[in-house]
Image (cartoon, coloured by chain):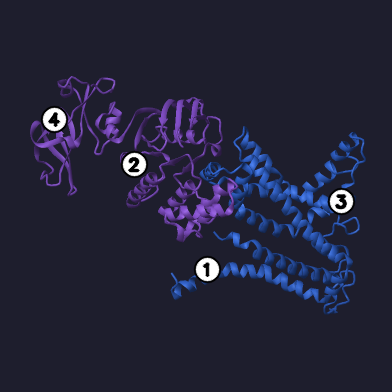
Amino acid sequence: MGQITLNQVRKSFGEVDVIPGVDLDIKDGEFVVFVGPSGCGKSTLLRLIAGLEDTTSGTISIDGKDATALPPAKRGLAMVFQSYALYPHMSVKKNIGFPLKMAGMDPAEAEKRIQRAASVLNLTNYLDRKPGQLSGGQRQRVAIGRAIVREPAAFLFDEPLSNLDAALRVGMRQEISELHQSLKTTMIYVTHDQVEAMTMADKIVVLNAGRIEQVGSPLDLYHNPKNVFVAGFIGSPKMNLIEGPEAAKHGAHTIGARPEHITVGDGPWEGVVGLSEHLGSDSFIKVDVPGIGIINVRGSGELGVHHGDRVKLNPAGKIHRFDANGLALA
Amino acid sequence: MATQSSRLAARLMVAPSVIVLLVWMAIPLAMAIYYSFRLYRLISPERTGWVGFRNYTWFINSPEFWMAISNTLLLVGGVLAITIVFGTLIALLIDQPIWGQGPLRILVISPFFVMPPVAASIWENLFMHPQNGMFASFAQGLGMKPILFMESYPMASVIFIVAWEWLPFATLILLTALQSLSSEQLEAAEMDGASAVSRFRYIILPHMTRAITVVILIQTIFLLGIFGEIFTTTQGGPGSASTTLPYMIFKQAIAAKDIGRAAAGGIIAVILANIVAYFLMRGIGRHLDA
């Protein structure tokens, strides 16, 4: 079981309200991703759930029981840290077995669990090494191994992939997703990378300045952003946000059009191509349209448009409309 | 890097310091060895000559000698034990975020700046003195007889005073080690269900082994030669209850004015220091490797 409920959780450091009050419901077995720009309070929120920080007010309950005042060890959660936080003087085996040893588990049973975790994570050949002798990806796996042996109610991941190189990051992303598929344990994952959020999450929580902007499935957030912040944050390249007379034509303060929803050819917007990037599979071009601004367009790989060309654009797909407060209009 | 000429250059560069070290170390050592086999008393300088190992045998057969050796080791071991245990505890304490941390740390470190004979005099006369000392007045206030520290417990008193002087050094080194421990490791251990005691035992202490090794090695070097504290307080007494090897050598050289015997004692002290160093490096030297 791993059902976590936050009720009006507030956290302030002195005068500064880092989290002004958050309500959130996490169902058992869900993969929830907290995403947001740096300093939005997503790590703090995770640490509040872990019990590494005390809440200023509000309650956190785990599986229906109030856990607000419980120490971290009593909450039944396991955490994977950004720096992995492995114990450098212990072998991989001792690192993974440390929580079991602290729980006073019978050594034979602990050994069995360590072996099982090691085989799941491909660490069997490294059990006697020290963390200093492992690569970044292996260290990451040891940190995950240390979390899974306890069979916790939920896993907490604090930007676990940010210290890995790009190729390894994609690999570990899949491994964590597969781990979630096989364990079916609640996972809460903090990242600033919206690609990680989109690919892994059952449910994304978009945070900005300590407030929850929107909660929903990845595609829900992509198709129906509730406000300008979510619209601009989810999706890559970023959604084009246009204000002024062009928006007024649609009866809105701001309109948004995703780069992949704009076609090159005939259309109402005309401009000069600035940057053009051809990746083979896709082409990304930036078009300076007078009176509207720079428009990002994502076209097919065959799009033969280059710097300096004059093109016409047609916002053929969905136009998102937002009012003066940045909220989406129906 | 390792071409012929660069190796030659490296040797030339190192040569001056090697020569200085040789002059500073080898010549006194050679003179000590020379005198240790000679009859050389300042009271009767006209009587000279080779005496073989007689200076050494006198030392080893002297009942004071074994006492001095054990006192020396007791002093080193006792001070090391006290400074490391309390140094660790104080370091843990002043590592906590508390009000007035800066001045507190300076206060903790300040005993190190007091010169050894001064520190010893302060403790002997202001605290441990049976008539004027603070401990004596406490004891009298409680209706007890004052303890005669320097008479009844001379070695323990000396160890206590020396430990007081060296505690700041140990605390300082151990505190810096403590501060280099990543807080995420401690948080991870907390999540893993480790109690405060377990966190200390399994995370903090292993992290500090290298610093503790450094403290042991450096302090041992200095503690083997402790002299001033004994000279100012017990003068090696009562009898020879608090005589250490350096103090015994001093008594032969200055009180008995027998340079030959003192030199023999000096050579024995060098051998003792080497034996201690050998066992130290075998026992804990591996902790110095990264």
**Secondary structure state at the residue bearing disc 4:** loop
Instruction: Give the Cα separation between the discs numbered 3 and 4.
Output: 95 Å
Chain displayed in blue: B
Say few, some or many: other residues with alpha carbon within 10 Å of mark 1 (under 14 / 14 to 19 / 20 or more).
few
Say few, some or many: other residues with alpha carbon within 10 Å of mark 2 (under 14 / 14 to 19 / 20 or more).
many
Say few, some or many: other residues with alpha carbon within 10 Å of mark 4 (under 14 / 14 to 19 / 20 or more).
few
Q: Identify which residue, B215 or B12, lies in the foreground.
A: B215
Q: Identify which residue, B167 or A132, lies in the foreground.
A: A132
Q: Residue most toward the left?
A: A266
The amino acid type found where label 4 is placed reads Pro
- Circle 1 is placed at which residue position? B13
The x, y position of residue A179, in whole percent, is 39, 47
- Does label 2 lie on the same chain as label 4? yes
Q: Which dot, 2 or 3, sits closer to the camera? A: 2
Q: Are marks 2 and 3 in contact (CB under 8 Å)?
A: no
Q: Identify which residue, B183 or A70, lies in the foreground.
A: A70
Q: Chain of mark 1?
A: B
Q: Left or right of B33: which side holds B173? A: left
Instruction: Give the Cα separation between the discs numbered 4 and 1.
Output: 71 Å
Q: Chain of mark 2?
A: A
The structure residue drawn at horizontal position 45% and vertical position 41%, both measured from the top left corner, is: A155
Q: Quadrant of residue A324?
A: top left
Tell me the number on the disc at residue B153.
3
Say few, some or many: other residues with alpha carbon within 10 Å of mark 3 (under 14 / 14 to 19 / 20 or more).
some
Colour of chain A as rendered: purple
Q: Chain of mark 4?
A: A
The amino acid type found where label 2 is placed reads Met
- Circle 4 is placed at which residue position? A290
